[in-house]
Amino acid sequence: MNAPQAIHAAEPSFRQSVEMMFSRAAALMNLSPGLEEKIRVCNATYIVRFGVRLRGGIRTFTGYRAVHSEHMEPAKGGIRYALSVDQDEVEALAALMTYKCALVEAPFGGAKGGLCIDPREWTEEELERITRRFAYELIKRDLINPSQNVPAPDMGTSEREMAWIADQYRRMATTDINARACVTGKPLTQGGIAGRTEATGRGIQYALREFFRHPDDAAAAGLVGDLSGKRVIVQGLGNVGYHAAKFLSEQDGARIVAVVEHDGAILDPDGVDIEALKTHLAACGGVRGYAQGTFRADAMSALEEPCDILIPAALEGAIHAGNAHRIRANLIVEAANGPITAAADEQLRDRGVVIIPDLYANAGGVTVSYFEWVKNLSHIRFGRMERRREEARHQLLVDELDRLGGGAPGEGLSAGFRQNYLRGATELELVRSGLDDTMRESYQAMREVWRSRDDVPDLRTAAYLVAIDRVAESYRAMGL
Ligand SMILES: NC(=O)c1ccc[n+]([C@@H]2O[C@H](COP(=O)([O-])OP(=O)(O)OC[C@H]3O[C@@H](n4cnc5c(N)ncnc54)[C@H](O)[C@@H]3O)[C@@H](O)[C@H]2O)c1
């Protein structure tokens, strides 16, 4: 993985940037200073250095697991493999997980982990040994545990690493009947759920559809109509960027006019063929050499091309004080975590660019992870099954989802999800409808605050207000 080129040298760190966004919203609330600080700071970060015997001798790696909040347990958040990983980064990402889960009402605290490693340097067999060793360190300290701390994939990791982690946990916690729920984003054969791999990109699609269902919101960005024909630039054709670009171009008629990757950008005003480029990327390790469109070696400058919608889906700090004034998109959807620094955020807002914030935009992953976790804990298939025999257990699962969602039976699930569940939809249909409902409802909650309060300047502040209020309420209710 490339070291990030982002976060402008003169700007605050990623964690400070998240804290600034938090504080901007908190200033509009009546939190006691003590409670505000309690919510803002990261509870604990575990740092481990471990050696693994690999080709060329013993290599030492540094890994992290930050737990930002435990107002609900388990704490939830991905594990990242990248050279950018450090304490500041995992704490920023863990904080975002707290607020994200609160916004989409996934009943979790916030966590994040990472290993400072370039996964491309190692063979699959070596990566398995490194991953199992890292998992061992975290499992020993209950930093991977179905009821306390549940990782998922993030940048540089996928269902493959999650399967190794789940297996490592199963071997170490042999009597834990809920072992499969120790990690989400697993392969289907290992207790995963249909639609998890695509979930974050799918969530971006649902978020954008919901945005364009509100002509006033689109107008605020100077846009009309729906997604059809909109020019889109995507940065990062990994899990999130690929699925978002694929769904938007194949199902909504959007035109992907540029894809920005670590080794350059492909520009094509007629629309990049996402499948073909993805195949090239997988085979060649980059976009250089792709036959269609125009290749540009200065990848970052491609973010500044004119477009309707910019989707940064790679690293934090991609849009910073040094390039924000050159961004020509009307609407930016933060598929990555923290792709816009606090300083750039203000510049863009002053210029009338609308930003759909990370807390909301990329919450599809954790939403479907929540479904997977519940499926693992309930030990029944999630979706179509033999109705009569399973009916009672179905009802139990529906009630349990309601309860975990914070409501009495019948209150916590949206009507669409409940209806699909009870008609015996397939797992994939169920996951997609549950995700769609979540993205719609969370948008409404955020929008309501944005539109109803003069002192709330943008969707990001609104998202933080909703999230902080829910976390504060949880702390107030349980006592500190
Ligand atoms: N995977 C998820 O479910 C999920 C959920 C929520 C948020 N996110 C966030 O989305 C972002 C991407 O995660 P992912 O899972 O898609 O990662 P990934 O590892 O699958 O893909 C990242 C992509 O970005 C590219 N990239 C790396 N450096 C780059 C650079 N300098 N310029 C342009 N492209 C570059 C990589 O080549 C790769 O194609 C991260 O910020 C992550 O935290 C991921």
Image: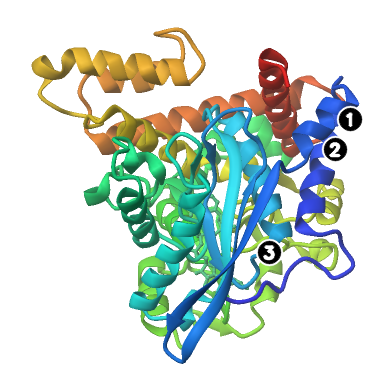
Q: Which residue is mark 3?
A: 86
How much space separates mark 1 and mark 3, taking CA atoms? 29 Å
> Ligand 1, what quadrant?
bottom right
Q: Which residue is mark 1?
A: 27
Q: Residue at x 41, y 52 (%)?
A: 247
Query: Which labelled disc corresponds to residue 456?
Result: none
* Residue situated in front as seen by the camera: 6 or 304: 6
Nearer mark to the viewer, of 2 and 3: 3
Please name the amino acid that badge 2 sits on: Ser
Q: Could one spot residue 331 in this view of the protein?
A: no
Left or right: 326 with respect to 366?
Answer: right
Q: Residue at x 65, y 50 (%)?
A: 93
| The residue carrying mark 1 has its beta carbon less than 8 Å from ligand 1 | no
**Upstream in sequence: badge 1 or badge 3:** 1
Local crowd size for mark 3, using a 10 Å CA cut-off: few (<14), some (14–19), many (≥20):
some
Q: Which residue is mark 2?
A: 23
Placement of the N terminus among the 4 image quadrants? bottom right
**Upstream in sequence: badge 2 or badge 3:** 2
Placement of the C terminus among the 4 image quadrants? top right
Please name the amino acid that badge 1 sits on: Ala
Q: Are marks 2 and 1 in contact (CB under 8 Å)?
A: yes
Displayed quadrant of residue 322 = bottom right
Please name the amino acid that badge 3 sits on: Asp
